[in-house]
Image (cartoon, rainbow, N blue to C red):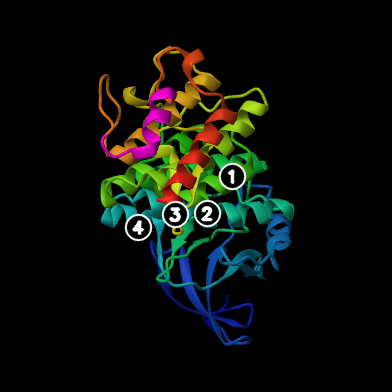
Amino acid sequence: MGDTGKLAGRYRLLNPLGGGELLLAFDEVEHRDVVVRRLRAPAGSLDTAVREARRTVGFVHPAIAPLLDVPVEDGEPWLVTAFAEGSSLEQTVRGRGPLPVRQTARVGVYVLSALTAAHAAGIVHGRVQPGNVLLSPTGRALLTGFGLPSMGMRPGADLWSLAATLHFAVEGRPPGQAPAEASDPLRALIRAMLTPAVPPVDALEWTLGRLASDRSLEQVVAADGPLPPARVAGVGLAVLDRLSAWHGRGEHHGGVQPGTVLIDAEGRAALIPPPVPAPPPAYLPPEGVPGPAGDLWALGATLFLAVEGRPPAPGASLLRAGPLAPYLVGLLSGPPAGRPTPEALRRQLLDVLARCDIS
């Protein structure tokens, strides 16, 4: 680098960032702040690492701090990355504690979006970790560290590392040999991502996106109180649509409960697909065998909570359900054969909506 304090004749080095491995610099050609770091690689693989890094130059995405240049000075390669304000996820969690579920899910949305685009371009990051996720002052998460040696990793390794990073964000520790219990949909999703059978990327995107923006039915009732029968019937119809799709494929959900029904800002409901946490006892069907009939019973128990403000219990009376009451009684029938079919339940819920409109 010589005595000029300048890299490649254009990047004037200013001061260390973080622990000192990163350096703030000023690009005198483009008149912008950048971040530079040495490109280190195992012995004998430096040329390969430089070629791989240069493949990443020009890859741009809203959720990354892009790699701008890979200059070689006196035989030593460097990575030049766009400067972005913010603190790393690692610094934030160690300084302030774990992030809330919704903020963690938002981090996941940004990083997964960046990784999906990178993989589509044939780029594997290889170093997804809390120290390479930057939380900006505007609430965005940016993935940094592109161009570092990926050591021949495959895209699946990036997804595992994303799960470990989200585990650190919400738990304050890496998963190690004992990941956190799947006590809510986000933690259930993280645990599933840490196994060889990773859920499809589109399912990850959908679930993280909804967890980042919506409240669960359980949270809505806890904050706003029981819902009116017509609104509960609308929730039931939306969940029934999702269940019917699974049942039509010969599958079942197995985790219908107020915590897995999400309500968006317009009041629309959606059911999170598996993996989901195990339901509490109040939402387990009495037959103890998962299946389509058990899903319908659990839907009845979920709607009971929505309209009454409490989970069902043996002998519990329905005080607020109005025209929904007899249909909930049918759904919560002990013998599966006594429960309505999905088609009959749809007619019943539509009847509730019609009667509430008339009244």
Q: Earlier in the sequence, mark 4 or mark 1?
A: 4
Q: Which of labels 2 and 3 is toward the front?
A: 3
For badge 3, the amino acid type reads Gly
Q: Nearer the viewer, residue 13 or 241?
A: 241
Which residue is the site of mark 4? 91
Q: Which of labels 2 and 1 is toward the front?
A: 2
Q: Is the C-beta separation of discs 4 and 1 under 8 Å?
A: no
Looking at the rendered structure, which numbered label has been put on residue 267?
3
Q: CA gap, disc 4 to disc 1?
A: 21 Å
Q: CA gap, disc 3 to disc 4?
A: 36 Å
Residue 332 within the magenta-colored segment of the rendering = no
Which residue is the site of mark 1? 158
Mark 2 burial class by Cα count in 10 Å: few <14, some 14-19, many 20+? many
Q: Is the C-beta separation of discs 3 and 4 under 8 Å?
A: no
Q: Earlier in the sequence, mark 2 or mark 3?
A: 2
Residues in magenta, as a range: 319-330
Q: Earlier in the sequence, mark 3 or mark 4?
A: 4
Q: Quadrant of residue 257?
A: top left
Q: Quadrant of the N terminus?
A: bottom right
Q: Is the C-beta separation of discs 1 and 3 under 8 Å?
A: no
Mark 3 burial class by Cα count in 10 Å: few <14, some 14-19, many 20+? some
Q: What secondary structure is the magenta-colored segment mainly? A: helix
Q: Earlier in the sequence, mark 2 or mark 1?
A: 2
Which residue is the site of mark 2? 109
Q: Is the C-beta separation of discs 2 and 4 under 8 Å?
A: no
Query: Residue visible at 61% across and 83% down?
Result: 10
For badge 2, the amino acid type reads Val
Q: Which of labels 3 and 4 is toward the front?
A: 3
Looking at the rendered structure, the secondary structure element under dot 1 is: helix
